[in-house]
Image (spheres, rainbow, N blue to C red):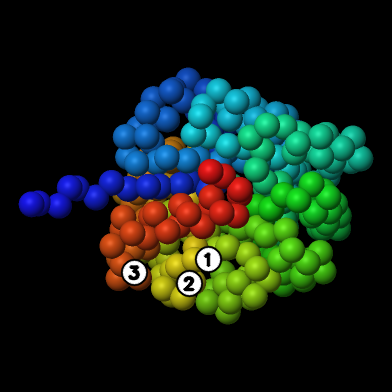
Amino acid sequence: MSQPPAVLDLFDTHAHLHFPDFAVDLGEVLARARAAGVRRMLTVGTDPATSRAAIEVAAREPDVWASVGIHPHDAAAADAAALGEIERLAEAPRVVAVGEIGLDFFRDLSPRPLQAQAFRAQLEIARRLRRPVLVHCRDAHEPTLRILAEHRVGEIGGIMHCFSGDVEIARRCLDLGLLVSLAGPVTYPKARALPDVARFVPGDRLVVETDCPYLPPQPFRGQRNEPAHIALTVARVAELRGEPADVLAARMSENGRALLGMA
Ligand SMILES: [Zn+2]
Ligand SMILES: [Zn+2]
């Protein structure tokens, strides 16, 4: 008897499906994702308004879940009212995480002290509500890891999303209890340390994401990214690790489901 073709079980753990980039054709985008084997997608808020929009998409689509949070870019607007709304939204149905939260010292769109303040406040929201966190970190690994350690992130769990560090940073994320998420840049010719990171992270601590509409994998660079393209990132990570793509995909999907408490 011949083997049936491998059916991929893909989980896009970080997407922004509720962004205006998908307003016209979200139905087609989701259809292409499902055809490619994407069984679960997590759509991630970046401020109170986009967090509400994320919840609305998750309420309509059975394979989409939501996360709510205030991105470091928007930290200057993270006053008590905004943080209170995030805490309230985090209890809505199908909200499985708080994020994305963190520090971005690359673009510095909000003052750094306010980024740190919003990050800490949301780590405490996540702790109160027992939700894992989705961490955004750009050019800010030392302060991000310090804050995560001070707030004992290992007790609530989380994902270092769109991982951009090296093996040493990955090891420190694992020591803190985080999962490491690889995105499209692992497929780029100039992937820097990411191929080593893809080989280093244990199979039970790794997940993948598109971060769509941003960061498309290599063949689609310059275009809008979408969840169906996660298959290319999985194929590259599997190649780097020397594992069958279907086995790795299922394992990473299981890692994400376990952390986020999904059936
Ligand atoms: Zn991010
Ligand atoms: Zn994002």
Is residue 179 in sight in this rendering? yes
Task: Give SS at disc 3.
Answer: helix
Q: Which mark is residue 205?
A: 1
Callout 2, which amino acid?
Pro
Q: Residues within 10 Å of mark 1 (few under 14, many from 20)?
A: some
Q: Is residue 86 left or right of residue 254?
A: right
Callout 3, which amino acid?
Leu
Mark 2 sits on what residue? 202
Task: Give SS at disc 2.
Answer: loop
Q: Are marks 2 and 1 in contact (CB under 8 Å)?
A: yes
The percent coordinates of residue 21 (x first, y second) are 52, 30
The percent coordinates of residue 39 (x first, y second) are 42, 40
Q: Are marks 2 and 3 in contact (CB under 8 Å)?
A: no
Q: How far is the residue under mark 1 from the one under mark 3?
A: 16 Å
Callout 1, which amino acid?
Arg
Q: Earlier in the sequence, mark 2 or mark 3?
A: 2
User: Could you tell me which residue is drawn at 46 percent across and 25 percent down?
Assistant: 26
Mark 3 sits on what residue? 240
Height in image: 159 above or below 17? below
Height in image: 113 above or below 168? above
Q: How far is the residue under mark 2 from the one under mark 3?
A: 13 Å
Height in image: 249 above or below 141? above
Task: Give SS at disc 1.
Answer: helix
